[in-house]
Amino acid sequence: MRLDKPIGILLLLWPTLWALWIAGEGRPKPWLVMVFIAGVVLMRSAGCVINDYADRKIDSHVKRTAQRPITSGVVSKQEALLLFGVLVTLAFLLVLTLNPLTIGLSLVGAFLATSYPFTKRFTHFPQAYLGAAFGWAVPMAFAAQTGNVDARAWWLFAAVLIWALIYDTMYAMVDRDDDLKIGVKSTAILFGRYDRLIIGLLQLVFLGLLAYSGKLFGLGFYYYLGLGVASALMFYHQWLIRDRRRDPCFKAFLHNHWVGVAVFAGILADYYLP
């Protein structure tokens, strides 16, 4: 479940909170906040379990993942599948406290989360698929808060998808040499020597989508100040990955958490400060 490595929880949590606060115009329903935070923890944990199950034969060939529980024999395949089933069931029980539209959308989200680990065998864009899985919290949050999915929410969804494509490509840069040897696909491999340039362009698209979303939802100065901080952080990430070395690329991936913090801080300030 990798609860000792909460970066995945945080990267999924921040856009979920963005959407809840924007959908609730600064006053999301407290029960929804609790349900979605618990759901983030449960579904990210379930995603880690099914990912380890799907990659059990691959992980032994990758330096970073060779000691994961299934690969190292600490946990059996059956135990992993049982744990996955328990986590998904708990998450679904939480969703059953919400409206029918949100319940329906949760089924799509569960499919995306479950199928994501297998995409790296078929496409060079598993990072984009992950973005769709993480971004699905956005329409769910709007559905839960308002009873429908505002058309404007899809711009926010697109921003989250692009953001995941950015930071997960940085993550894939860590494993690129190993992935090339074993035939696993990724955007880091697809982009090749243009990886930094394409990541930079995607960062501009991400910030542009967030800026446009802010305009659509009537957010003001503090929100755009938060985007300014996020821009500076992304410039720092470009500096970290400049030599494409494993440790700095991994650090850049981890540091994307602060981009989420900056955007959420801007949303909160915009709603609560004069």
Image (cartoon, rainbow, N blue to C red):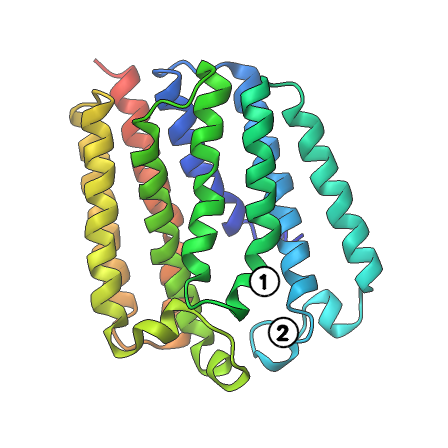
Quarter of the image for residue 259 reads top left
Pointer 2 and pointer 1: residues touching (CB < 8 Å)?
no
Q: Nearer the viewer, mark 2 or mark 1?
A: 1
Expressed as whole percent of the image width and height from the top left, the position of residue 156 reads: 32, 35
The residue under label 1 is which amino acid type? Phe
- Disc 2 designates what residue? 59
Q: Position of residue 64 (x, y in %)?
A: 56, 73
Helix, strand or loop at label 2? It is: helix
Q: Which residue is mark 1?
A: 118
- 260 above or below 237? above
- The kind of secondary structure element at disc 1 is helix
Along the line of sight, which residue is nearer the eye, 272 or 65? 65
Neighbour tally class for label 1: few under 14, some 14-19, many 20 plus, Cα within 10 Å: some
Which residue is pictured at 17% across the width and 23% down the height? 220
- Measure the alpha-carbon separation of dots 2 and 1: 13 Å
Of pointers 2 and 1, the one earlier in the residue sequence: 2
Above-or-below relation of 17 to 147: below
